[in-house]
Image: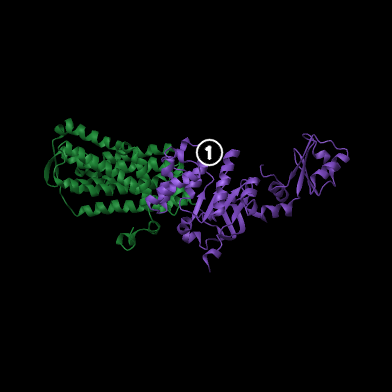
Chain colours: A green, B purple
Amino acid sequence: MSRDTLLWRVAPPILRSARRPQRVVERNAIVYRRTPMVLISGFFEPLFYLLSIRIGFGALVGDVDFAGRSIDYAEFVAPALMASSAMNGAVYDSTMNIFFKLRYSKTYDAMLASPLGAADVALGEIAWAMLRGFVYSISFLVCLAALGMAGSWWILASLPACLLIGLAFASVGMALTTYMRSWADFDWVPAITLPLFLFSATFYPLSSYGGLAWIVQLSPLYHGVALVRGASLGVASWGMFVHVGVLLALATVGLSVAARRVETLLLK
Amino acid sequence: MNVNEQPAIRAKSLTKKFGDFEAVRGIDVEVRPGESFGFLGPNGAGKSSTMRMIAGVSPVTSGTLEIFGLNPATHGSEIRNRLGVVPQADNLDGELTLLDNLIVYGRYFDIPRAECVERAKELLDFVQLSERSSGRVESLSGGMKRRLTIARGLMNRPEMFLLDEPTTGLDPQARHILWDRLYRLKQQGVTLVLTTHYMDEAEQLCDRLVVMDAGRIVAEGSPRELITRYSTREVLELRFGTGSNVEHEGRLLGVGNRLEVLADRVLVYADDGESALHEVHTRGLQPESSLVRRSSLEDVFLRLTGRSLEE
């Protein structure tokens, strides 16, 4: 990371000690070079939802009002499923995989014996998880296009938003994983991601939640869905800065906690 | 100051605490570049904790520690860049092939990829694992894993090589292969620092060593010096049968320089073991078996701590 950018100067001190997190990404890329299919297994879930909506559900629901215009239900849901696929990819990688490397395979102990430090491990692993989520998002986008559901070229604008969702969820995922004590603790992962998936204005607009809308807005995925949906439908608003801000804040906190915890757990 | 005059390790009152437990209790150590240095002691003596501090992966609780003249707390990354490490527990990358284990590790040091490939092949050859280069780590025996870990630790051509219990759990043949490789490194001028609880290993590999017990250094010197200082040239081992060794102590008094009565045998420290044995027979004692051997670091340890290392 270049040391004179704004991003560098606002980064928390622990992250500024990072030197070459890209080597951690490189290591993972070499591992998955052999088993590329594993990378995209998790993208099927949103795809199946999409197909179910496309096949019948959409016809029952009809059109949805969004930003002052009426759009096809499938068109409304597709961006939200794409956002969810970014979350899934990032969460799968940053929980189970990182737990295994942290507690069992001692992969990080070996990295920390080299010039790499805790911040490199955290940044590298989170970047990798983010990229894995991004692969899900792109595969999902390809499916949308194949089904003739991609809509306008605006959908490409949603890709950076997917990266940001991946970054936020990977960071929080890794931070929480460092606190997990056994595999049983991972039962909590779907218990958290499933409600996020269902209740982040994914399947119906925020207005449908009535007085409970504020709870939905607490969901990090809600901000991701709003960003991806706005971008892919070509609807910009000032609220998008809030969404970006929330996801960036989560990423920063998650990254710092993850780096600090790797240090506490392994450099003792 | 010339870089070469800088000690590879300089520790003063080095202390490590884990909560209330004091694993290392204020040790002073200085290791010169090119030297082979050993930490000898039983499990729990504080050797591994010391090694982890030296390797820059464990913060110093108090005292000072300098590696190549640098403070690990502030220059950890620079120090680790110049170190090779073989940890006590294998942490090879099970998701990678043998060759990739080395290449990926070299990349952590920012060594160009082509250079990594070249060095990895060379090192697999050095540790006699070339034939398995595309195999997986889990298919290796314990000795092979340890050799691969050694090859990995050499990827960055370290100035100092740290080995924590390098041959624990290996069969004699595997140990001898390892010793041979380490001896070659020593000849190339690499500073070797190792911990061991094997006496023969310390005698084979170390120019100088410290004996640690309960977090403290109890003796320091070359293997020969320590044996001369704390033991006799030879040792006569007598076995009188289980339970009856203690009874014979009184009748053995005065034979040799010193007696050490253990549960299973009596050790008679003497410069001439054969004449000590003759004296035993003259006194009319009939041990079930007797053996004259050269003194070893085991005897030094026994003398210093009153305990055997293997306990």
Q: Residue at x 48, y 53 (%)?
A: B157
- Out of A76 and A160, give the one closest to the viewer: A160
Residue B19 seen in the figure: no
The answer to whether residue B185 is left or right of residue B213 is: left
The residue positioned farthest toward the bottom in the image shown: B1
Q: Residue at x 47, y 35 (%)?
A: B139
Instruction: Give the percent coordinates (x, y) of residue B16.
Output: 57, 55
What is the chain letter for disc 1? Answer: B
Quarter of the figure with residue A50: top left
- Out of B234 and B67, give the one closest to the viewer: B234
Instruction: Give the percent coordinates (x, y) of residue B11.
Output: 58, 60
* Residue type at tag 1: Gly
Q: Residue at x 36, y 53 (%)?
A: A253
The answer to whether residue A51 is left or right of residue B192 is: left
Q: Residue at x 62, y 46 (%)?
A: B201
- Out of A241 and B237, give the one closest to the viewer: B237
The residue positioned farthest toward the left in the image shown: A69
The answer to whether residue A200 is left or right of residue B34 is: left
The residue positioned farthest toward the right in the image shown: B283
Instruction: Give the percent coordinates (x, y) of residue B51.
Output: 55, 52
Residue wearing tag 1: B142
The answer to whether residue A79 is left or right of residue A266 is: left
